[in-house]
């Protein structure tokens, strides 16, 4: 562990699959002691998900590995009397609890915020769901695909021929998890608080909150959001352009950047063309301008153009595959990829994308096997070996 602003904080992670585990992934990297509470025998569904069937069969699926390093795992049957009692004992010593069950599930187990706050009045309780704890959609299950569609994201992704189009990774789950992590950390930062906090995270609302420009253009300027493909709807030339060997991105959003671009391609007359004289006209004549630029870009490779453009202050970059991005020294040198010993292998997992005082936060342990720390955690709570054995026999752990 490098920097640990949440060191000494204990988080109970009762979450499954992605949004909740991703939230607690952030908190673990910030130094919190994250205890993952899982169902005996099955655990987090993500343990059986991922591109490696052998790992799935071992309940260590790639999808689980991605956001669970640094956590401890205890198995509890929360439908059993003993399982509920143990969770309450954990709550008494916890700073926060995160769950992503459908609204009402924890209350039906007599483990909702009202009940658990009696065990620990200072508990920060975070409930992540697809649509929030109330409202007409509250009872619907939380699936990334569904939230992407209902948030409006898919309606503006792709172009006029392909939209609606799904974003290529589970962005609704991820944004929901990030929102939850921010809210939990903020609540924990209030060291003077003398009562608990109930945090209600709606994945739908969290996604829409990140669509600020699109939503504000609709609410304030009455502009109907449309799919624009790879084009920036605020400026031109700003988007993806074909080159001699592929494509590149350009973001010449400022007038001086556009003028520099025209000089670099050897066509300064474009600056004087009334169709391209200012931002408004360039947007109105985007397709014509793109054709002019791509005729020039066809004479050299992406790398050659990126080097020429960036040297003159015109923002430009290649379009990488995931493999290419991960292989670049920019990532390797900043500590985003962290190596963990998992079974007989050293595997790389992704950190959190931030540095604190020049250091990338890390965790000291790999993702846990199901229930790997059950005995240790119960011992910390004061249970002896005989009592632990009895709990196993009754199916509580």
Image: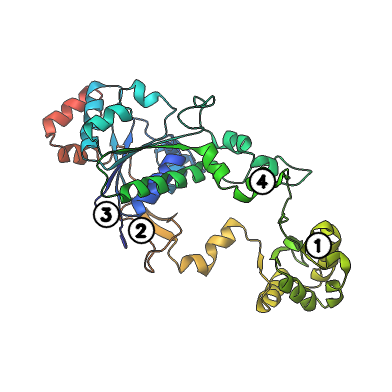
Give me the residue at 74% from left, 50% from top: 228
Asked whether the residues under the numbered discs 1 and 4 touch, taking CB atoms below 8 Å apart as contact, a structural biologist would say no
- Image quarter of residue 35: top left
Q: Which residue is mark 2?
A: 362
Q: Which residue is mark 3?
A: 7
Cα separation, mark 2 vs mark 1, equals 46 Å
Cα separation, mark 3 vs mark 1, equals 52 Å
**Disc 1 packing (10 Å; few <14; some 14–19; many ≥20):** many
Cα separation, mark 4 vs mark 3, equals 43 Å
Sequence-earlier tag: 4 or 3: 3
**Disc 3 packing (10 Å; few <14; some 14–19; many ≥20):** some
Q: Which residue is mark 1?
A: 282
Q: Is residue 15 left or right of residue 156?
A: left
Sequence-earlier tag: 2 or 3: 3
Callout 2: SS = loop
Compared with 283, 69 (above or below) is: above
Residue 243 point in image, percent of width and height: 77, 66
- Quadrant holding the C terminus: top left
Cα separation, mark 1 vs mark 4, equals 23 Å
Asked whether the residues under the numbered discs 3 and 1 touch, taking CB atoms below 8 Å apart as contact, a structural biologist would say no
- Quadrant holding the N terminus: bottom left
Q: In the image, which is nearer the foreground, mark 3 or mark 1?
A: 1
Q: In the image, which is nearer the foreground, mark 2 or mark 1?
A: 1
Q: In the image, which is nearer the foreground, mark 4 or mark 3?
A: 4
């Amino acid at each position: 562990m490098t920097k640990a602003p949440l060191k000494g904080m204990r988080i109970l992670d009762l979450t499954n699959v992605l949004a909740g585990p991703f939230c607690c992934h952030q908190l673990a990297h910030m130094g919190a002691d994250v205890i993952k509470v899982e169902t005996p025998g099955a655990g987090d569904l993500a343990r059986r998900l991922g591109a490696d069937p052998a790992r799935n069969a071992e309940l260590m699926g790639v999808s689980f590995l991605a956001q669970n390093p640094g956590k401890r795992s205890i198995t509890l049957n929360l439908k059993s009397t003993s399982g509920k009692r143990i969770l309450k004992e954990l709550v008494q010593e916890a700073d926060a609890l995160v769950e992503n069950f459908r609204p009402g599930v924890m209350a039906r187990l007599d483990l909702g915020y009202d009940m658990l706050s009696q065990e620990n009045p200072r508990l920060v309780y975070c409930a992540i769901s697809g649509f929030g704890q109330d409202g007409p959609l509250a009872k619907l299950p939380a699936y990334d695909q569904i939230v992407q569609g209902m948030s409006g994201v898919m309606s503006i992704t792709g172009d006029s021929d392909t939209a609606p189009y799904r974003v290529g990774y589970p962005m609704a789950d991820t944004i929901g998890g990030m929102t939850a992590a921010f809210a939990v950390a903020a609540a924990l930062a209030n060291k003077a608080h003398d009562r608990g906090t109930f945090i209600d995270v709606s994945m739908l609302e969290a996604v829409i909150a990140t669509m600020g420009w699109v939503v504000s253009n609709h609410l304030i300027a009455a502009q109907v959001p449309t799919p624009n493909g790879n084009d920036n709807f605020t400026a031109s030339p700003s988007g993806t352009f074909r080159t001699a060997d592929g494509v590149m991105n350009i973001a010449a959003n400022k007038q001086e950047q556009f003028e520099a671009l025209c000089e670099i391609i050897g066509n300064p007359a474009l600056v004087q063309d009334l169709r391209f004289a200012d931002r408004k006209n360039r947007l109105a004549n985007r397709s014509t301008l793109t054709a002019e630029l791509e005729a020039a870009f066809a004479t050299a490779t992406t790398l050659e153009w990126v080097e020429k453009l960036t040297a003159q202050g015109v923002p430009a970059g290649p379009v990488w595959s995931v493999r290419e991005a991960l292989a670049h020294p920019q990532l390797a040198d900043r500590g985003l990829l962290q190596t963990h010993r998992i079974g007989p292998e050293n595997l790389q997992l992704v950190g959190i994308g931030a540095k604190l005082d020049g250091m990338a936060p890390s965790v000291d342990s790999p993702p846990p096997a199901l229930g790997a720390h059950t005995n240790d955690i119960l011992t910390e709570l004061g249970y002896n070996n005989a009592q632990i054995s009895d709990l196993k026999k009754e199916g509580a752990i």
